[in-house]
Image (spheres, rainbow, N blue to C red):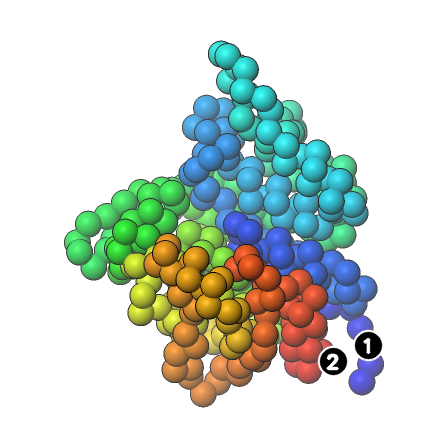
Amino acid sequence: MRMRELAVGCFGGGTGLPNVLGGLKTNPWVHVHAVVTMFDSGGSSGQLRDELGVLPPGDILKCALALARSEKDARHLLLSRLPSLEHARLAGHTGGNLLLSMMAQHSGDFLAGVDGLRSLLGCRGHVWPVTDQQATICAEYATGGSSRGEVEVDAEQARGGSVTRLWLEPPVRMHPRVAAMIQQLDAVVIGPGSFYTSLLPIFLVDGAREVFQTFKGPVVYVANLLTEGRGMEEFSAAKAIRGLEEAIGRQVDVVIFNCDPPDGKVLARYAREQKVPLALGELSSGTDVVEGRFWLGAIARHDRGRLRAALWAVLAGRLL
């Protein structure tokens, strides 16, 4: 076996993708490219999007912080929120969201703003917005109802709405630089993250299916630890994979799956939110499973070290 450096694209958003990035950045044989969802409508990101007309900066910021040279210090500084001052429009925003928004407005180019933030933080890896065009996530449910916006889709799922169709409004296109970068990757990692608001929307942008249909490297899906509310009671890793395969027009080669949930006290706390351990489901014969204990703490989050080791085992086994 001859060691070589691998370009790996990691797709997602929220809190799941930064956990993958924070682990992979320590591997000297991996060049990390984070491709981030751009359809956040809640919190500081949603407010800046509405008031300033900028692309939502939150998920981009989290990924840049995960790749930062000094992640702890950067998080402490840039995730601090400005104090609530009367009549202050900036109160409540994180310093990082404001900084990225200002850099993007100053340069007139969101990608240039992201690159500036990456240089400032000394990131080991690249961060890419999947598109630089504004769009909103829209969903229809088995009940016949519909909703608009990431926050509303998440809320409806929690109440029991089962998503039957998801789309972006208006339609937007994958940034051409991102499409060109994907063609140079050795492997793709998708997830973990909220399926209908962090993962699937990335692959609904125009041009995504065409890019992935010609991609020859392995595609790896990191399955979530839990379902996401009453609307996903029958959801499984296999169903997520089928949805991703339909979106990208090719097979998912490997799923990384947690097969050892924590003790009952931890699960009982999540059960009160109608969240239960995600089932594996029935996979197609072409998808391999890497199972292990990835949930170690009281919070539903993959252990960085174990996830990094599992991903490297997959990459080395298929590419080296």
The vertical placement of 197 against 30, above or below, is above
Circles 1 and 2 in contact, beta carbons < 8 Å:
yes
**Res 200 visible:** no
| Neighbourhood count class around disc 1 (C-alpha, 10 Å): few under 14, some 14–19, many 20 upward | few
Question: Residue 174 or 187: which is nearer the viewer?
Answer: 187
- Left or right: residue 86 compared with residue 239: right
Q: CA distance from mark 1 to mark 2?
A: 7 Å
Q: Quadrant of the N terminus?
A: bottom right
Question: Residue 295 or 283: which is nearer the viewer?
Answer: 295
Question: Residue 209 or 262: which is nearer the viewer?
Answer: 262
Identity of the amino acid at label 1?
Met
The vertical placement of 95 against 194, above or below, is above
Q: Quadrant of the C terminus?
A: bottom right
Q: Secondary structure at mark 1?
A: loop
Which residue corresponds to the image point at 42% horizontal and 82% vertical from the top-left? 283
- Left or right: residue 174 compared with residue 161: right
Q: Mark 1 sits on what residue? A: 3
Identity of the amino acid at label 2?
Leu
- Left or right: residue 128 compared with residue 2: left
| Neighbourhood count class around disc 2 (C-alpha, 10 Å): few under 14, some 14–19, many 20 upward | few
Return the mark for residue 260.
Answer: none
Which residue corresponds to the image point at 80% horizontal and 73% vertical from the top-left? 4
Residue 217 horizontal/vertical position (percent): 61, 73
Q: Mark 2 sits on what residue? A: 320
The quadrant in which residue 120 appears is: top right
Which residue corresponds to the image point at 50% horizontal and 35% vertical from the top-left? 45
Which residue corresponds to the image point at 53% horizontal and 75% vertical from the top-left? 260
**Res 56 visible:** yes
